[in-house]
Amino acid sequence: MDTQVDKILDDTVAERRPEVYLMVMSGPEDGRIFPLAKESTSIGRLETNDVALMLDPVVSRSHARVAREGERFLISDLDSKFGTDVDGVKVQPGGKSELRPESMIRIGETLLVFRTAAGRGT
């Protein structure tokens, strides 16, 4: 019975999630979901960012950017003070790193996961 209830809850939550999004896995804003619906998504501590991580003091005001290039999503670090890591590898200033389903992104004290509808297994 519990597995049926869990599946129903998972399916219900999945129906409300955007096609492509970042989800905070740990950090001050744990559990928040940020859709990546635009061609370019800004990430930083300022409220004006598309992904505003205002509670993490280690995040720069304008920290990183995710850009859609065709079917690919690339993240770049905007010369932030503490950098951006994707799957444990530092994104070089001025460089880009491709995001794949379930890529883990470390920005400040915040850990995000990159998810797509195709990568969720639903």
Image: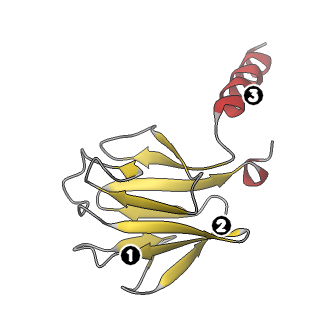
**In terms of depth relative to the viewer, which is nearer, 61 or 118?**
61
How dense is the environment of label 3, judged by Cα within 10 Å: few (below 14), some, or many (20 and up)? few
Contact? badges 3 and 2 (CB < 8 Å): no
Looking at the image, tell me whether mark 1 or mark 2 is earlier in sequence order.
1
Question: In front: mark 1 or mark 2?
Answer: 1
Q: Is residue 115 left or right of residue 63?
A: right
Distance between the alpha carbons at the discs numbered 3 and 2: 22 Å
**In terms of depth relative to the viewer, which is nearer, 81 or 102?**
81
Q: Is residue 4 above or below residue 22?
A: above
At x 40%, y 46%, the residue is: 26
Which residue in the structure is indicated by mark 1?
Answer: 77
- Amino acid tagged 3: Asp
At x 63%, y 53%, the residue is: 115
Which residue in the structure is indicated by mark 2?
Answer: 100
- Amino acid tagged 2: Arg
Query: Can you tell which mark lies on residue 11?
Result: 3
Q: Is residue 32 above or below residue 16?
A: below
At x 79%, y 12%, the residue is: 1
Question: In front: mark 3 or mark 1?
Answer: 1
How dense is the environment of label 2, judged by Cα within 10 Å: few (below 14), some, or many (20 and up)? some
Distance between the alpha carbons at the discs numbered 1 and 2: 17 Å
Label 2: element kind: loop
